[in-house]
Image: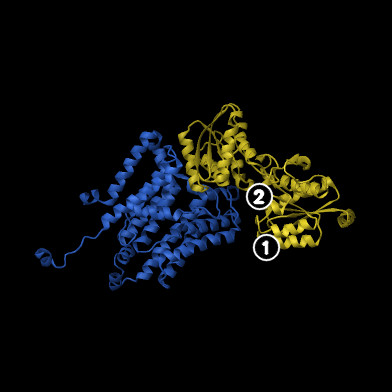
């Protein structure tokens, strides 16, 4: 009997939802991703749903091609234009190829923003970056400092000597070094984003600096290799490996204790913010122009720069408390 | 015999390595500690194993550029098998790795033997194909430490008599190859084929088949290293060991294996790999700018090749002694 009741109530709820979704005055926001079936984007869709529930009267259409191609996304965009959605928030497979299709959407009055992976400025009203170089640079040193209350020697294990991203992050890190007293960056080595070279360089660091307390690796290959090297050298607990990595790749290192925490963007927050921004722009609550501050719910405001780009937040910190939840996501 | 050894390539290389270790230890005393030297040897083990296979291939006047891609593909395959069947004994994993690697090597061998395509073209092609296959079977995803079973990753680092299993496998491979090269008909056939293919045919050696076996050997070793590599670094993805094939060829060349075929030795390949291993492990601890590191590795290779060229230059033969005297 109770089962029957449950089914009936479920059906009832489902009908209400469908009725709600079918209402014409709902704001329909399409979240277009690089490809369907990728954990990172599924998590972003979850965040967008969260925003929709918070706002009320919003329907999220989570869609994308089956493989990461620009052609596939163009088809999806054309279909969305035909459906007359209110807003499109896209993570693009190509910076330029999508511009004509997105322009067409904007001509029909659809709000277009890009997030995660951007499109050229003429194809969108704003772009949401997960974070900024300055925030990342600050975060990687903060991660090391948080576990070193008494200060100590830390070293950086980067990708290649010519990796633009890593070099900018390290530069930004050096700018804010003064805020972390007692933290002493003793050297920067390059693992070339190869597991074996990174492993060897991490070993070299441990030998060269016997008092080393932390290795900061702002690269996903480097951080995994350094964690393995620290574990193999029996220095878990003495040396903390931190930096930027993916939860699925770092779960082992968090379990073993070689890494206490690391950071990367949070896809749920990203999807949430993208949906909030798309909603506010499409409803005329804000306009996308350089210097504008656009609210994105619990994530605060997005400040736009001259290219109409903005950074969402600090990279999100992952540690033993949340790794289980995120390791299956991305 | 002793005098021959003293002026041999191997002796010179051994001396160079010892001098190098000596110089490094003046800048970083911790380098010469036995435990560290054991670490260096262990770190060089994959290179040693691959250099042995490559040496045999190069001796037969071929080259195998697909070893690193073979390593990566086999590594991914065994890692995937491990995630699907975590309880499979390591012995089975080792067998699968070697057989799978040997099959990939056999593909190279067949193309070189039956279709008579130049080995450099064949292995350049299979190198890309193997890397592509990894992407296909893995969808570009990584297999990470927490997805592998503890046995799988623990095997290469298990200690026996103070050395990790990885090092023992390299030592075992050196011994087996030494016997194969110096004590078997196949070993002699490799040199005959590389030294003079036409003469080899007249002695009843099937040149193509000998080369085929060289590729199979190289492939089997690459497959074995694939498992060891993935287990050691506890991660498998498309790009592992990217560019490693060039390091393997460099180890052979430094070890005095002639690219023109017919010349080479197990000791040479071992020492060539050790030389590169010492350089690679020393550079991070002696505080040399990373920009110089590449230049130093490159110079070592060029110097070795220059020495090879000098040593292997054939002296002109006088066919008409009298004519030469009369001028």
Counting labels gives: 2
Q: In the depicted view, which residue is nearer to us: B51 or A255?
A: B51
Residue B192: percent from the left, percent from the top? Answer: 30, 66
Residue depth check, mark 1 versus mark 2: number of the one nearer the observer: 1
Query: Which residue is identified by label 1?
Result: A71
Marks 1 and 2 share the same chain: yes
Residue A20: quadrant of the picture: bottom right
Q: Give the residue drawn at x 55%, y 52%.
A: B236
Q: Which chain is blue?
A: B
- Left or right of residue A328, residue A157 in this image: left
User: What is the spatial separation of the Cα atoms under label 1 and label 2, in whole angstroms?
Assistant: 25 Å
The residue pinned by badge 2 equals: A330
Could one spot residue B202 in this view of the protein? yes
Considering every residue shown, the one lying at the far left of the view is B326
Q: Residue at x 83, y 47 (%)?
A: A284
Residue B200 versus residue B296: which sits nearer the camera?
Answer: B296
Residue A152 lies, with reference to residue A103, above or below; the image says above
Chain A painted colour: yellow
Q: Residues within 10 Å of mark 2 (few under 14, many from 20)?
A: some
Q: Residue at x 68, y 55 (%)?
A: A92
Relative to residue B74, is residue A218 depicted above or below? above
């Amino acid at each position: 009997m109770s089962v029957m009741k449950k089914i009936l109530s479920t059906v009832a709820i489902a009908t209400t939802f469908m009725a709600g979704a079918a209402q014409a005055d709902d704001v329909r926001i399409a979240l277009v991703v690089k490809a369907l079936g990728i954990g990172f984007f599924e998590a972003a869709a979850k965040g967008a749903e969260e925003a929709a529930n918070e706002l009320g009267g919003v329907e999220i259409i989570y869609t994308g091609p089956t493989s990461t191609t620009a052609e596939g996304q163009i088809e999806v965009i054309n279909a969305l234009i035909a459906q007359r959605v209110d807003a499109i928030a896209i993570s693009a497979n190509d910076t330029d190829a999508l511009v004509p299709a997105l322009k067409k959407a904007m001509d029909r009055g659809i709000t277009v923003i890009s997030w995660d992976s951007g499109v050229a400025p003429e194809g969108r009203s704003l772009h949401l970056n997960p974070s900024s170089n300055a925030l990342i640079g600050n975060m990687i040193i903060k991660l090391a400092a948080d576990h070193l209350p008494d200060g100590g020697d830390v070293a950086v294990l980067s990708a290649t000597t010519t990796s633009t991203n890593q070099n900018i992050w390290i530069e930004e890190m050096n700018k804010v070094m003064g805020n972390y007293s007692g933290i002493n960056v003793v050297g920067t080595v390059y693992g070339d984003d190869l597991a074996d070279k990174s492993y060897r360089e991490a070993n070299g660091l441990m030998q060269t600096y016997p008092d080393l307390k932390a290795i900061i690796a702002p690269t996903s290959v480097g951080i995994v290799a350094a964690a393995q090297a620290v574990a193999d050298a029996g220095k878990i607990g003495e040396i903390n490996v931190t930096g930027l990595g993916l939860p699925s790749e770092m779960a082992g290192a968090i379990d073993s204790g070689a890494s206490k925490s690391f950071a990367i963007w949070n896809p749920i927050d990203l999807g949430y913010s993208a949906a909030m921004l798309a909603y506010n722009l499409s409803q005329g609550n804000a306009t996308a122009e350089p210097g504008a501050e656009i609210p994105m719910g619990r994530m605060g405001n997005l400040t736009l720069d001259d290219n109409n780009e903005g950074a969402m937040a600090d990279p999100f910190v992952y540690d033993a408390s949340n790794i289980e939840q995120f390791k299956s996501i991305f | 015999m002793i005098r021959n050894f003293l002026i041999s390539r191997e002796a010179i290389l051994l001396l160079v390595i010892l001098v190098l270790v000596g110089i490094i230890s003046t800048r970083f005393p911790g380098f010469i500690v036995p435990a560290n030297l054991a670490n260096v040897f262990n770190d060089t083990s994959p290179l040693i194993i691959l250099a042995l296979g490559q040496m045999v291939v190069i001796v037969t006047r071929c080259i195998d550029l697909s070893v690193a891609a073979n390593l990566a593909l086999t590594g991914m395959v065994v890692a995937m098998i491990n995630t699907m069947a975590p309880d499979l004994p390591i012995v089975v994993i080792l067998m699968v790795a070697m057989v799978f690697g040997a099959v990939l090597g056999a593909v190279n061998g067949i193309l070189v033997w039956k279709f008579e395509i130049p080995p450099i073209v064949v292995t350049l092609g299979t190198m890309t194909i193997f890397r592509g296959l990894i992407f296909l079977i893995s969808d570009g995803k990584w297999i990470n430490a927490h997805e592998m079973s503890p046995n799988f990753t623990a095997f290469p680092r298990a200690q026996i008599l103070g050395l990790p299993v990885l090092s023992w496998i390299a030592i075992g491979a050196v011994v087996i190859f030494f016997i194969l090269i110096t004590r078997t008909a196949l070993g002699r056939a490799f040199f005959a084929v590389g030294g003079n293919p036409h003469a080899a045919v007249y002695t009843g050696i099937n040149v193509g088949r000998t080369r085929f076996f060289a590729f199979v050997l190289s492939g089997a070793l690459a497959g074995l290293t694939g498992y060891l590599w993935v287990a050691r670094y506890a991660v498998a993805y498309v790009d592992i060991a990217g560019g490693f094939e060039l390091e393997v060829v460099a180890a052979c060349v430094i070890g005095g294996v002639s690219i023109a075929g017919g010349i080479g030795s197990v000791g040479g390949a071992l020492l060539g790999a050790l030389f590169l291993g010492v350089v690679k492990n020393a550079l991070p601890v002696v505080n040399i700018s990373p920009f110089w590191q590449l230049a130093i590795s490159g110079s070592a290779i060029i110097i070795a090749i220059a020495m090879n060229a000098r040593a292997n230059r054939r002296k002109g033969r006088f066919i008409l002694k009298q004519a030469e005297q009369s001028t």
